[in-house]
Structures are given as C-alpha cells and as structure tokens.
Image (tube, rainbow, N blue to C red):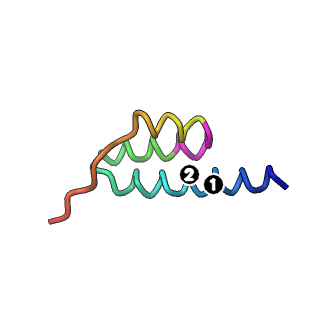
Amino acid sequence: MEYGVIGLIILALDIYAIVKILDSGASGLAKILWILLVALLPVLGLIIWFFAGPRGGSVHT
C-alpha cells in the first residue's frame, strides 16, 4: 500500500515538473530534453530538474 502512495506522489511531482518546464522560458529543444529526462527517470530526473532545471516563466506579450 505504501508503495502506491509513494508512486502517486512521484507521479504528481513529475506532472508538476513537466508543467513548470513547459511554462519556462527555455528553448523548445531544452524543454523536450528536460521533459524526456523527467519522464524516463522519474525520481532522478525530478531531483536533477529541481537543482538544475530551467527557471523563470515564459514571457507573455
């Protein structure tokens, strides 16, 4: 049971990271690479994104 809860938490955090990546000001290729990293390595990718991922929101004009 506890593994299911942990899995859901990791899934929710990965979805949050992907939304933040899409909203970042990074280039299209950088966004794709970050999303692939987070999707293919859910825990490790999330940790790497947290410390080194793109920062800042996109510019809306």
Quarter of the picture holding the N terminus: bottom right
Q: Is residue 22 left or right of residue 27?
A: right
- For disc 2, the marked residue is 14
Give the image location of residue 49, x and y in percent: 46, 39
Q: Which residue is rendered at x = 65% and y = 54% of the image?
A: 9
- For disc 1, the neighbor class at 10 Å (few under 14, some 14 to 19, many from 20) is some
The residue furthest bottom is 61
Q: Residue at x 28, y 54 (%)?
A: 57
Secondary structure beneath disc 1? helix
Identity of the residue drawn at 49% across and 47% down: 35
Q: Amino acid at mark 2?
A: Asp
Give the camera-side residue of 29 and 16. 16
Disc 2 and disc 1 in contact, CB within 8 angstroms: yes
Name the residue tied to disc 1.
11
What amino acid type is highlighted by mark number 1? Leu
Q: Is residue 29 magenta?
A: no
Q: Is residue 1 left or right of residue 37?
A: right
Q: Quadrant of residue 53?
A: top left
Could you classify mark 2 by the number of other residues whose Cα lies within 10 Å: few (under 14), some (14-19), or many (20 or more)? many
Image position, residue 6 (x, y; %) = 72, 50
What residue is rendered at 48% in x and 51% in y? 17
Dot label at residue 32: none
Residue 23 rendering spot, x and y as whole percentages: 34, 57
Q: Which residues are magenta?
A: 36-43
Q: How many marks do you count on the picture?
A: 2
Hey, which residue is sitting farthest right in the picture?
Answer: 1
In which quadrant is the C terminus drawn? Answer: bottom left
Residue 31 against residue 5 in the figure, above or below: above
Overall secondary structure of the magenta stretch?
helix
